[in-house]
Image: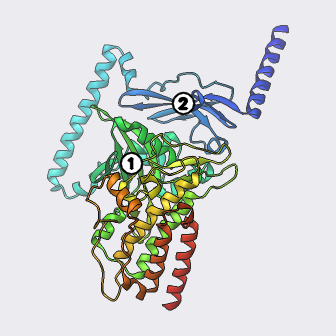
């Protein structure tokens, strides 16, 4: 009787401890949380997952928030590629779990020689008989239906059904980001998506690696592949893209980040939406634009940059972000002729509460041709976040000049050129740019014929106000967005 009473009291004490821990927030082991000593806090649960990857069991430990906990995708899962468990006391996930028997192919090693022989022989015999019957049937019917019935090896259907049951990728991202923190897909879902992508063709090369077009469940995705020596760049870009509330129609849609071992070296993947028209640089090289097309392109870029620069205050807030490498090669063109800002690997975030800016020691990053005067002559105040936003505006004015030159006015259109093409070499040094921009105070030429077109006249004025030597005198992204919006209304009223 006393033993039962003691047992009941112990169980009650444990229950009370678990409740108290849950009410004040759990502390869990988090493998990726290096900045917080590999721990994380949550109001949900501690989470442990094991996934079979290349024949090895990989364990992940992290926190699960309340919205993710309600989605039931994390807890009590025992699929054939992963197993997950949740618990509700401090550091309760500091354990290692394993795949259940039958999930890990290594369980076959536990079988005896007779059982192993039977397991190998019987399937081989059945497969041989089936193969003979298939060949006979195919020959007798002239293989009429073989092509129709052959499965597409590029479509990993089982994985698609696991993560994306009957939904488009965009719908899946919307569902999971709006129900959670708004910062992106859960880690386990990201890894599952990344590891079932089939690469199709290389579409470009950037500062840190190659960009490929890939296929996932029949949908095109872009895969940016970093080498292992650029791990810091990969991690930084993935971190920026997963900032809470960053998602916007004019900012490249992030899907997943994962590291993949191809047998020789480790590849670092960044998966995003795919835009078949490519970069704005490629688009302008092969296309001219109308006045309406120019307004559409410039307005969408201003919208994306305004959202990037804007701070959203609140529990689910967004910090202000500066791009620091804005140029036509880092802006993508969608099918509907609007733009999305990409390549956020050099971006910096501003913490308004602590008034801190997380930037590397070297301020001279980005593309030299697009650097603002204060960066070229090293007079930029690195302690004021507004300085970074103003430098972005200078670069934006140069991008607008590239677009406006390709606008047809009375049948006259100029060939595509990069900014300062006529005064600096094709690969200018910082010293080359400093002499032209800071000492000679030159800016790209705005042709006189632009005055005959209202849209180009307004764009020319915007450019001049983006190129002031004094950064504080430049326009803000929001002001530019409003000005182009008013221009758009005037053009619509004319039509």
Q: Is residue 37 above or below residue 79?
A: above
Picture residue at 49% right of the left edge, 67% below the top: 466
Residue 304: give x, y in percent of width and height. 51, 63
Q: Helix, strand or loop at disc 1?
A: helix
Whether residue 94 sits left or right of residue 215 in the image: it is right
Q: Residues within 10 Å of mark 2 (few under 14, many from 20)?
A: few
Q: Which mark is residue 157?
A: 1
Query: In the orientation shown, which residue stands out farthest toward the front?
Result: 439
Residue sitting at 35 percent across and 58 percent down? 435
Above or below for 432 versus 36: below
Quadrant location of residue 13?
top right
Q: Which residue is mark 2?
A: 34
Mark whose residue sits in front, 1 or 2: 2
Kindly check if marks 1 and 2 are in contact, taking CB atoms under 8 A apart as contact.
no
Q: Position of residue 465 (x, y in %)?
A: 50, 70
Disc 1 residue crowd, few under 14, some 14–19, many 20+, Cα 10 Å: some
Q: Position of residue 491 (x, y in %)?
A: 49, 86
Q: Is 381 displayed left or right of 365 in the figure?
A: right
Question: From the image, which quarter does the N terminus lie in?
Answer: top right
At numbered mark 2, what does the secondary structure look like: helix, strand or loop? helix
Inter-mark Cα distance, 1 to 2? 35 Å
Residue at horizontal 57%, vertical 38%?
A: 74
Viewer-proximal residue among 190 and 244:
244
Residue 284 seen by the camera: yes
In the depicted structure, whether residue 320 falls above or below residue 295: above
As drawn, 491 above or below 117: below
Q: Is residue 214 visible?
A: no
Return the disc, 1 or 2, that comes first in the chain's sequence: 2
- Closer to us: 274 or 162: 274
Closer-to-camera residue (47/249): 249
Residue in front for this viewpoint, 49 or 393: 393
Q: With 329 as the anchor, is 363 left or right in this view?
A: right
């Amino acid at each position: 009787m006393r033993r039962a009473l003691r047992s009941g009291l112990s169980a009650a004490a444990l229950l009370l401890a678990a409740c108290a821990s849950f009410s004040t927030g759990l502390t869990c082991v988090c493998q990726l949380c290096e900045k917080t000593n590999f721990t994380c806090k949550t109001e949900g649960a501690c989470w442990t997952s094991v996934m079979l990857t290349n024949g090895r069991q990989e364990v992940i430990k992290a926190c699960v928030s309340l919205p993710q906990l309600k989605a039931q995708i994390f807890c009590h899962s025992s699929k054939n590629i992963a197993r997950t468990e949740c618990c509700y006391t401090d550091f309760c996930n500091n354990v290692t779990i394993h795949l259940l028997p039958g999930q890990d192919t290594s369980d076959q090693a536990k079988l005896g020689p007779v059982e192993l022989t039977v397991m190998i022989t019987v399937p081989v015999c059945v497969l041989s008989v089936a193969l003979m019957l298939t060949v006979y049937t195919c020959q007798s019917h002239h293989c009429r239906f073989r092509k129709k019935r052959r499965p597409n090896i590029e479509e990993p259907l089982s994985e698609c059904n696991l993560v994306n049951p009957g939904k488009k990728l965009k719908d899946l991202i919307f569902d999971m980001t709006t129900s959670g923190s708004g910062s992106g897909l859960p880690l386990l879902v990201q890894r599952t998506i990344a590891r079932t992508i089939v690469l199709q063709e290389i579409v470009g090369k950037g500062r840190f690696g190659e960009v490929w077009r890939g296929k996932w469940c029949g949908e095109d995705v872009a895969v940016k592949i970093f080498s292992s020596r650029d791990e810091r760049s990969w991690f930084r870009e993935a971190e920026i893209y997963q900032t809470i509330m960053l998602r916007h129609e004019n900012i490249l849609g992030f899907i997943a980040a994962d590291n993949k071992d191809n047998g020789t070296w480790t590849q670092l993947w960044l998966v995003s939406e795919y835009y078949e028209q490519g970069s704005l640089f490629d688009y302008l090289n092969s296309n001219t634009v109308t006045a309406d097309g120019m307004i559409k392109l410039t307005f969408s870029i201003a919208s994306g940059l305004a959202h990037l620069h804007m701070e959203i205050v609140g529990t689910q807030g967004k910090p202000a972000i500066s791009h620091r490498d804005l140029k036509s090669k880092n802006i993508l063109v969608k099918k509907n002729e609007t733009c999305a800002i990409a390549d956020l690997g050099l971006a910096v975030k501003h913490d308004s509460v602590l008034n801190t800016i997380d930037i590397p020691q070297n301020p001279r990053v980005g593309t030299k041709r697009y650097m603002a005067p204060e960066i070229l002559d090293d007079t930029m105040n690195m302690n004021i976040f507004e300085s970074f936003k103003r430098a972005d505006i200078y670069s934006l004015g140069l991008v607008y000049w590239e677009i406006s030159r390709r606008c047809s006015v009375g049948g006259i259109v100029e060939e595509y050129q990069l900014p300062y093409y006529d005064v600096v070499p094709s690969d200018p040094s910082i010293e080359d740019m400093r002499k032209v921009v800071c000492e000679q105070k030159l800016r790209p030429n705005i042709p006189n014929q632009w005055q005959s077109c209202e849209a180009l006249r307004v764009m020319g004025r915007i450019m001049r106000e983006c190129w002031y030597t004094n950064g504080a005198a430049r326009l803000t992204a929001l002001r530019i967005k409003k000005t182009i919006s008013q221009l758009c209304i005037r053009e619509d009223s004319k039509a």
